[in-house]
Amino acid sequence: MRQYRIDTTEYSIQAPFNMRIAFPSDFHNGDHVRILRKIRDWKPDIILMPGDLVKGYYPKDGRLVVEHSERILPFLRGCVQIAPTYFSYGNHECLLCEEDIELLRSTGITILDNEWIELPETGGQRILLGGLTSGHVISFRRFRNQSDSTDRYPVRRKPHNVYELRTESKWLDDFEKEEGYKILLSHHPEYWRMREPYIAGRRIDLTLSGHAHGGQWRFFGQGILAPGQGLFPKYVRGIHQGDGPEAGKMVVSAGLNNTYWMFPRFGNPCELIFIELNNN
Ligand SMILES: [Fe+2]
């Protein structure tokens, strides 16, 4: 594939323990060889991926979506060889059928679909990891369940009211009450303060988001456009502090690839993030 620029950003965040997190977001069938090399070199303890592995279209050649985006499975297999890998659904995963999801799971990744787990082998520290599923996936699921088509992809066009539908987030109310360090994979950064479930006001220590692709075009440090946020979006990359004494931080990735060739990035390289949680 054509070489494109991928920058690496490292953050160090205070926590009650040490942990090295690789945070590859919005892979979009990107350059898996280069991305895997960078992740392997950094030696993470864990790999956390908040959505958008695929590119948003259906294959016309009869293959599954995750086969057609042919770098996804090698990328995930490579990740699992480096460290335990966890994934939550982004909006582009609304395309996937059960067979696609089975293939994703067969690589050894753990998919968190509006649920949370306690991480194993953390040296006595209670660390909880949740995955908030994109509202787009929820809406497509509903439409797919209503369809009587036998087509493996019965919903080929976006339901017209997809943007009005919300994610299912009731489980977050219980999640934030749990004791321990809480990490949430949440593809959409607009869920932070612009839409329900308003994560910025919750007792969640660290939220990882992507989706906004840095604002697509950047001039003088300002992104221009992001889905779900509109013009001059606020949450497109960087680190953001939540509201109140118990709120945590959100880190937003500019993503690992572009989605549509007709909208190239400008002044806005792709980004692979590494986060060092440390108790120093
Ligand atoms: Fe997205």
Image: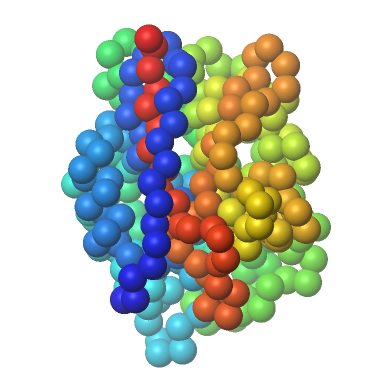
How far across and down, in percent of the image, does residue 271 sit?
Answer: 44, 51
Comparing 251 with 68, the one in front is 251
Comparing 164 with 194, the one in front is 194
Quadrant occupied by the N terminus: bottom left
* Residue 88 visible from this viewpoint: no
- Residue at (27, 35) in percent of width and height: 44
In this figure, what is the number of numbered marks? 0
Quadrant occupied by the C terminus: top left
- Residue at (25, 39) in percent of width and height: 42
How far across and down, in percent of the image, does residue 179 sit?
Answer: 53, 12
How far across and down, in percent of the image, does residue 227 sit?
Answer: 69, 60
Quarter holding residue 21: top left
Q: Answer above or below: position of 244 versus 39.
A: above
Quarter holding residue 147: bottom right
Colour scheme of the picture: rainbow
* Residue 246 visible from this viewpoint: yes
How far across and down, in percent of the image, does residue 26 sit?
Answer: 48, 56
Q: Is residue 38 left or right of residue 270?
A: left
Q: Answer above or below: position of 204 versus 109.
A: above
- Residue at (51, 23) in percent of width and height: 182
Q: Is residue 164 left or right of residue 261?
A: right
- Residue at (63, 49) in percent of width and height: 221
